[in-house]
Image (cartoon, rainbow, N blue to C red):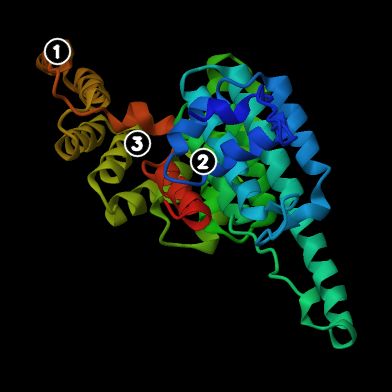
Amino acid sequence: MLLIFLLVAVRTPATGQQRETPFQGYLAVASVYASANHASALDEIGKWPLPAIDAAVAELRGKERQLRAAPSAPDEIAFGTVEAAVLMHAEAGLLALQASRKAEAEAHLRTSTTLFEWSRRAAVTARNYATMRRSLVERHGPALLRPEIRERIGFVDYYQALAAAALGMGFPETARPFAARARQAAPLDAQVQLVFGCVAETLALDAAVRGRESETLQLQEEAGRAMLDALALDSTLHEARLRLGRLLVERGAVVQAEPFLDAAERAATDERQRYLARLLLGRVAQRRGRPDEAARFCAAALEAWPDSQAARLALAQALEKQYGPAAARPVVAATLSASRRPDRKEDPWSLYPFGPPGTAKEALARVWQSALNR
């Protein structure tokens, strides 16, 4: 078991072999994480007290000069092991977040980002030293050369993955600094702007529920700017167009919202986007005093997503305003009946605050594939 590697060795053979230290045990866990046994490594690192992890990471950061692309001596440390540790703590943090163990999640995510930022600086320093060594090759021979350290975890991909994953689990406040870091590094990346906008939008929803008007307004403005930037960078990013339309509706700017939502509905690439655009267009029509049009849009939304509770209730409301309570009653009854079906699909409207579906999965897969080939 890996636990053997984690103990400050009890064995001290007669040969005088040195005992394994906690730091060496930490590197062993990271190495195993890089292998096919990553689940075992996650289980083991989960048993470590947080102060012990902090001590091991501090010791690792003190050994910057011993980092190597391909170690050839016992005291040298593989840079790939450091990158494995970065992702090990990231995954441990996300798993803890999923289980609502917030303090543990924050500790692992903080360790991951600390190691990540340090490792990138260390890689640059190592390459600078490599450049200096090349100048000595002619006098002392090629033995001075060794393979250069190269990072496999993309800076923007890493922060984008953490942001999308935290948002997808329902923790926009955790996602915010990661999304901001990715946006700072790649302001011309439309997907980065979209994820940042989604995080700000969900935080605005939370602030509105808590009655924090000024905070809600500020976050809505942040989200709106990010969505506009995303569209300016990629006009085919219909998710940004849809979300910008919803933000305008929330701010009462229904006239400005309508063309965005209309374009999103016409260009929708899947039933989810089409459903959400129609649902929001129904809300626009309702607020503009066009109940017949609102009813048509809500019925069309229900056609796109038959299991939708939100569309049924919006349709019932539109029918009631147009024809009275009797017209709405069958729709309400159908809503209650549909809610009892165990096989009904989850309503995309209830999942809307968690960001575009699939974004987190794709971002995480990109990072883990590039660094660990899985």
**Disc 3 to disc 2, C-alpha distance:** 45 Å
Mark 2 is on which residue type?
Tyr
Q: Secondary structure at mark 1?
A: loop
- The structure residue drawn at horizontal position 54% and vertical position 63%, both measured from the top left corner, is 233
Residue 52 lies, with reference to residue 78, above or below; the image says above
- Of the numbered discs 1 and 3, the one sitting upstream in the chain is 3
Point 59% across, 59% down: residue: 152
Instruction: Find residue 242 and report its horizontal and vertical position in percent.
Output: 40, 45
Q: Is residue 279 left or right of residue 365?
A: left
Residue underneath mark 1? 340
Q: Quick check: can you spot residue 171?
A: no
C-beta proximity under 8 Å, tags 1 and 3: no
Residue contact at pointers 2 and 1, CB within 8 angstroms: no
**Considering only vertical position in the picture, is 49 above or below 165?**
above
Mark 2 or mark 3, which is nearer the start of the sequence? 2
Q: Secondary structure at mark 3?
A: helix
Would you identify the image quadrant in which residue 350 lies?
top left
At mark 2, the secondary structure is helix
Which x, y percent locates residue 325? 17, 11
Q: Tell me the kind of residue under disc 3.
A: Leu
First along the sequence among labels 2 and 1: 2
Residue closest to the far bottom:
138
Q: CA distance from mark 2 to mark 1?
A: 43 Å
Q: Looking at the picture, how far across and down is residue 146, in whole percent?
A: 73, 71
User: Picture quarter containing residue 110?
Assistant: top right
Category of crowding for the residue at label 1, using alpha-carbon neighbours closer than 10 angstroms: few (below 14), some (14–19), many (at least 20): few
Residue marked by disc 2: 33
Q: Amino acid type of disc 1?
A: Arg
**How crowded is the residue under tag 3: few (<14 C-alpha within 10 Å), some, or many (20+)?**
many
Look at mark 3 in the image and give the residue it sits on: 280
